[in-house]
Image (spheres, rainbow, N blue to C red):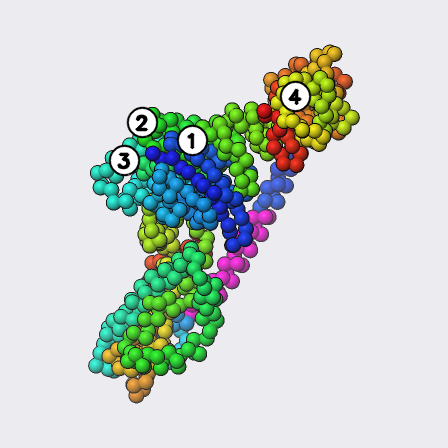
């Protein structure tokens, strides 16, 4: 079993600077866990602590049943793929792949067999006798992947492995890595993955579950659908999803037929759906959140907001419209034709879809519309 | 109409060609001036060396007969007689002695300085800052200051008139300059590879041997080369610690031939000087490529 358990994990630099504030995380056997967050959120630090490249200041890390806090990286049953590939520049690809096995004292036959297996899986057989400097970025990353794979580790660690590749290659490597993970899982091999990235597209497309981090805290751990549909707080709501969710200051009051949200001089009345979701006692200053995709042009006579169009970015079949409502800026995504018809005079009437609207507590940022 | 356009086109082309030709001429002139200056300065700087080599094939009379460096009738007397020396030993013995000093000194320097630089560059340990300051501090200390205490120390140890005082300090990274040079080079090498090695199961020592050293080779060659050349040139060290003629390195042996001969046989001295220069020159040219790479401290491309 290669379950990874992190309990109250802390990292303190130079005695005073706390980078990681006692996080708890459980990665199940065979699970693909993505750690995602902006720069400086300590996601890489967490990964490096799991790898044993950083010391643990508090709490513990266990792989399977074994606490690995004080084990050297080589004894933890992990393999790591680095952002800069970190291939040994003076060794040919074959030797790069086999270095770990050689140190572990594997027999020559076993090493040759494993190298051949991995080379076949990753299609790097023609590269085996090349030096790393003779490889392209994509090839080098495949070799780096091979170096991890060949060890048959219990846990795979990826530290932003695709960020040095161009967009096209990144997309194909993404598929390759998830394929590989699925295949390992089907073969019953250890395939627990912790994958660090700052790219939410990578996180959403690759992860079984995603752990969103900020400033050394975990903001939410969940599968991609839940993160998108039910963000626990305003940070997660803003971080996940493209274009970013609109998060604006608003004031909330409870009318008789449902909650009323006011932005500056405009208000909109919502119905029972939102009323049922809202936590009791929520009133006054709140953060109102709705994704750009979850607006629609209002029907005549329907409760709606009058929006001034500031700028429209045409993206082919849809258009990103930047609008202002009651002094607040929003982005909405609308079908091109509908927008053209509606926006003749530089203003549109729109309405957020009630069931996709979120209310966040202004101070704590917590989502108070999840019940 | 169209005629005039063609005409003016031709004119423009002609002017352009003239301009380009003038530009080329200017470039050629500056090139000639530049190379002339470089050649003259180069020759002036190399003249003593040419003269040394030329004079070593002259007779004593011819040496003082003029400033030219081409021998009229080249003779090998200087080499043949110089090699025999005025002592019971040939010059070959002194070369061998030099080798006995330089080989352990160079090898020990490269190994010890690499280990120490690796320690300073990659590990945190208590007192690191103070220790590093001490190492760098010795760079600023004039050699002469430590001569007497060192002499007394080696005297106590009974190492006088042996080669130990000449190379043992190097075996403990006594040359701060080399530690510094390697350290700077190491700092330019990303740590990723070493971390990958640790994840692959290598301990610190294996990481050093299998991963760091191969990347550090150019710098290590520079260190070896510097140490080789400086030790070859070293006169004061052997002069202080070596007293028996049979243990003299070439630097002392050259001086010996000036001391003992009643009238100096200059052509012998010059001939042996040429031979003394040879090892440094050969080693330098053989390893020039690495040497330049090493001192320019380029490191590895990410």
Q: Earlier in the sequence, mark 3 or mark 2?
A: 3
Q: Earlier in the sequence, mark 2 or mark 1?
A: 1
Badge count: 4
| Marker disc for residue A118 | none
Q: Which residue is mark 2?
A: A187
Which residue appears at 33% of the width and 58% of the height?
Answer: B286
Asked whether B107 or A301 is in front, the reply is A301
Q: Earlier in the sequence, mark 3 or mark 1?
A: 1
Which residue appears at 35% of the width and 53% of the height?
Answer: B204
Q: Secondary structure at mark 3?
A: helix
Q: Nearer the viewer, mark 3 or mark 1?
A: 1
Which residue appears at 67% of the width and 14% of the height?
Answer: A338
In this rendering, do the residues under marks 4 and 2 share a single chain? yes
B113 to the left or right of A21: left
B224 to the left or right of A340: left
| Marker disc for residue A114 | 3
Q: Which residue is mark 4?
A: A275
Q: Secondary structure at mark 1?
A: strand
Q: Which residues are magenta?
A: B22-47
Based on the displayed image, in which of its 4 quarters is residue A353 positioned?
top right
């Amino acid at each position: 079993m290669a379950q990874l358990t992190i309990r109250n994990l802390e990292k303190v630099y130079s005695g005073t600077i706390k980078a990681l504030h006692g996080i708890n995380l459980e990665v199940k056997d065979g699970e693909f866990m993505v750690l995602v967050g902006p720069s400086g959120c300590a996601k890489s630090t967490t990964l490096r602590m799991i790898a044993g490249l950083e010391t643990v200041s508090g709490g513990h890390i266990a792989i399977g049943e074994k606490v690995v806090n004080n084990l050297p990286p080589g004894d933890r049953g992990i393999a790591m793929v680095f952002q800069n590939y970190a291939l040994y520049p003076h060794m040919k690809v074959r030797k790069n792949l086999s270095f770990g096995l050689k140190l572990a004292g594997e027999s020559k036959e076993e090493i040759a067999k494993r190298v051949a297996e991995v080379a076949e899986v990753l299609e790097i057989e023609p590269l085996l006798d090349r030096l790393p400097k003779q490889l392209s970025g994509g090839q080098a990353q495949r070799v780096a992947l091979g170096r991890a794979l060949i060890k048959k580790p219990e846990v795979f660690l990826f530290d932003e492995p695709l960020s040095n590749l161009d967009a096209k290659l990144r997309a194909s490597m993404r598929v390759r890595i998830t394929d590989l993970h699925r295949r390992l899982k089907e073969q019953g091999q250890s395939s627990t993955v912790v994958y660090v990235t700052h790219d939410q597209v990578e996180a959403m497309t690759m992860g079984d579950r995603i752990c969103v981090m900020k400033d050394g805290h975990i903001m939410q751990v969940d599968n991609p659908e839940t993160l998108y549909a039910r963000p626990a707080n305003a940070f997660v709501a803003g971080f996940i999803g493209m274009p970013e969710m609109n998060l604006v200051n608003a004031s909330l009051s409870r009318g008789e037929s449902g909650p009323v949200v006011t932005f500056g001089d405009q208000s909109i009345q919502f119905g029972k759906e939102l009323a049922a979701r809202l936590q009791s006692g929520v009133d006054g200053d709140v953060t109102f959140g709705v994704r750009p995709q979850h607006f629609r042009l209002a029907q005549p006579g329907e409760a709606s907001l009058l929006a001034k169009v500031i700028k429209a970015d045409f993206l082919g079949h849809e258009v990103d419209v930047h609008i202002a409502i009651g002094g607040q800026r929003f982005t909405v995504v609308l079908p091109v034709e509908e927008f053209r018809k509606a926006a003749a005079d530089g203003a549109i009437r729109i309405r957020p879809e009630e069931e996709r609207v979120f209310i966040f507590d202004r101070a704590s940022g917590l989502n108070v519309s999840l019940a | 109409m169209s005629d005039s356009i063609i005409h003016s086109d031709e004119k423009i082309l002609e002017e352009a060609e003239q301009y380009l030709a003038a530009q080329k001429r200017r470039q050629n002139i500056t090139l000639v001036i530049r190379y002339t200056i470089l050649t003259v300065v180069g020759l002036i700087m190399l003249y003593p060396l040419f003269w040394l080599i030329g004079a070593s094939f002259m007779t004593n009379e011819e040496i003082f007969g003029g400033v030219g460096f081409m021998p009229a009738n080249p003779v090998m007397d200087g080499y043949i007689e110089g090699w025999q020396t005025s002592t019971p030993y040939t010059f070959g013995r002194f070369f061998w002695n030099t080798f006995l000093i330089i080989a352990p000194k160079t090898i020990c320097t490269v190994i010890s300085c690499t280990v120490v630089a690796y320690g300073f560059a990659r590990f945190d340990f208590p007192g690191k800052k103070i220790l590093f300051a001490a190492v760098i501090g010795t760079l600023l200390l004039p050699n002469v200051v430590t001569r007497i205490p060192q002499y007394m120390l080696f005297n106590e140890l009974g190492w006088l008139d042996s080669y130990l005082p000449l190379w043992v300090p190097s075996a403990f990274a006594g040359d701060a300059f080399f530690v510094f040079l390697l350290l700077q080079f190491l700092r330019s090498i990303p740590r990723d590879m070493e971390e990958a090695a640790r994840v692959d199961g290598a301990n610190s020592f294996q990481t050093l041997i299998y991963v760091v050293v191969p990347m550090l080779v150019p710098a290590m060659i520079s260190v070896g080369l510097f140490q080789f050349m400086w030790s070859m040139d070293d006169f004061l060290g052997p002069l202080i610690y070596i007293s028996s003629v049979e243990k003299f390195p070439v630097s002392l042996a050259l001086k010996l031939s000036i001391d003992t001969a009643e009238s100096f046989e200059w052509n012998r001295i010059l001939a042996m000087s040429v031979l003394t220069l040879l090892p440094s020159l050969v080693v330098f040219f053989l390893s020039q490529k690495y040497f330049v790479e090493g001192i320019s401290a380029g490191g590895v491309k990410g």
